[in-house]
Image (cartoon, helix red, strand yellow):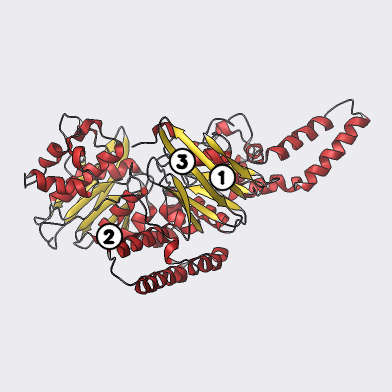
Amino acid sequence: MISTSNVTLRVGKKALFEDVNVKFTEGNCYGLIGANGAGKSTFLKILSGKLEPSKGEVIITPGERLSFLEQDHFKYDDYLVLDTVIMGNRRLYEIMKEKDALYMKEDFTEEDGIKASELEGEFATMNGWEAESDAASLLNGLGIDTDLHYKYLKDLTGAEKVKVLLAKALFGNPDILLLDEPTNHLDLDAIAWLEEFLINFNNTVIVVSHDRYFLNKVCTQIADIDYGKIQLYAGNYDFWYESSQLIIRQMKEANRKKEEKIKELQEFISRFSANASKSKQATSRKRALEKIELEDIRPSSRKYPYIDFRPNRSIGNEVLSVEGLSKTIDGVKILDNLSFTIGREDKVAFVGGNELAKTTLFKILMGEIEPDEGSYKWGVTTTQAYFPKDSTHEFDNEDTIVEWLTQYSEEKDVTYVRGFLGRMLFSGEDGVKKVKVLSGGEKVRCLLSKMMISGANVLVLDEPTDHLDMEAITALNNGLIKFPGVLLFASRDHQVVQTTANRIMEIVPGGSLIDKTTTYDEYLESDEMARKRQALSVKVEEEIVTEEE
């Protein structure tokens, strides 16, 4: 068990946390969530001892071992892969090296023999004889082949190093496991293995992740950083979000009888309890949900954007036809003879790790670059709105936010334009901010406002979730699901793709196209190699020095 007593952290005049008292218990996996700037990664560092709070203390049950996922990919370059993993249990690794040093001595004394026997006893108690096989098992599970186990970390790729450091954190059955964005740079087979590992892990896990799909799979509890405090809730991320929204709706309907509200909540909880999945967690999660009362759920202080794409006109039967598109960049074939037709009900997710290919295709379809060969044709009833991966040029000017958005609006009325900005949480004086000084998240919200005000019936989006917090991602996800037009999009967010797309396209190395009418999960289940090609690269969580957006 790990807990905090009156933990406070001040950054300048601002208190990031104020008198936080929270207890994380054995057998639960806690998803640590909060808005951008709330201090999720910072709190993990406090729990791990890497950062001292301004006040208060972290309490760990005596004798329990804590493990923390490290992010320094070069720290262990001069160590063997297997040794690095075993270092996850520092004391065990020290014993192994001390034993080896003793047995290699030429003048082995009686005193050395006594010391060696003591070390052997401690080594056996810590399951030292299984250490190498346990480490190898973790590595193999994450996709690090046996022939790499005795190589130095400096000889591995960046993605392989990430897996080794994750195996190091998991090694030795730690009593408390702290994970900060553990799915970054993992292929989907590795993520699935990690999900199963955590689901069956009997100790305490606290995880920060922007991957809602992952949080929904592994979490039994949500730890929400809000109001400068941390509140625990039973269930996964979706349950926390939906229940928070339910309470907000009920608060707005103040005249409803408490009995009716309680009945509505119970029905809601029953639905989620029935859907609680995955082996050992299912029963405990269901029991926890069934015990929830109305007063247990507190509405979040966070504000959610309102994203609603409404086409100005219906789309006809002819949307987009592509014939023999090819493109070579710097001598490499990026697109190779691509041909496909898009229908009026298609919501197409372009997936896979070949990001340049996806961006290149979108740029061609939006007329920004020319193909080397082939052609494409948009239907006469279509209007397109584009979210580019690189939007730097859009904001390289002296315009205010209102001026910037007004140029894209048919209706030039300032009040009308401010309405769209208000949906995206730009209110009051925000409208006179210069676009060139906006943060990454603010620029994304501006671009989404531009797409909404356009009234387009075809949306083309290239990684729109980059720089967004989970609240904005959730709002965007809901907006894309509701959109009645055609979608062509690329996103690293598994849940966005799974809940939105009805057709999957993947441009594989060499530039050829795989095209299937299916959901994302069904696509991955049908093709083992497809799972390995999907590498997540989620933005790194904010550091303490950049806590504000």
The amino acid type, in three-letter code, at marker 3 is Phe
Q: Say what secondary structure mark 1 lies in.
A: strand
Q: Mark 2 points at which residue?
A: 481
Q: Which of 504 and 393 is in front in this view?
A: 393
Q: Say what secondary structure mark 3 lies in.
A: strand
Is disc 3 surrounded by few (<14), some (14 to 19) or many (20+) residues within 10 Å? many
Is disc 1 surrounded by few (<14), some (14 to 19) or many (20+) residues within 10 Å? some
Q: Name the residue under label 1.
A: 4
Q: Say what secondary structure mark 2 lies in.
A: helix
The amino acid type, in three-letter code, at marker 2 is Ile
Q: Distance between the residues labelled 1 and 3?
A: 11 Å
Please give left or right for residue 391 compared with residue 506 in the image: left
The amino acid type, in three-letter code, at marker 1 is Thr
Q: Is 18 placed above or below 246 here?
A: above
Residue 184's x, y, as percent? 46, 44
Residue 354's x, y, as percent? 36, 44
Residue 525, by quadrant, is: bottom left
Q: Name the residue under label 3.
A: 17
Q: Which mark is first along the chain, 2 or 1? A: 1
Q: Which mark is first along the chain, 3 or 1? A: 1
Q: How far apart are marks 2 and 3 (CA)?
A: 36 Å
Residue 162 seen: no
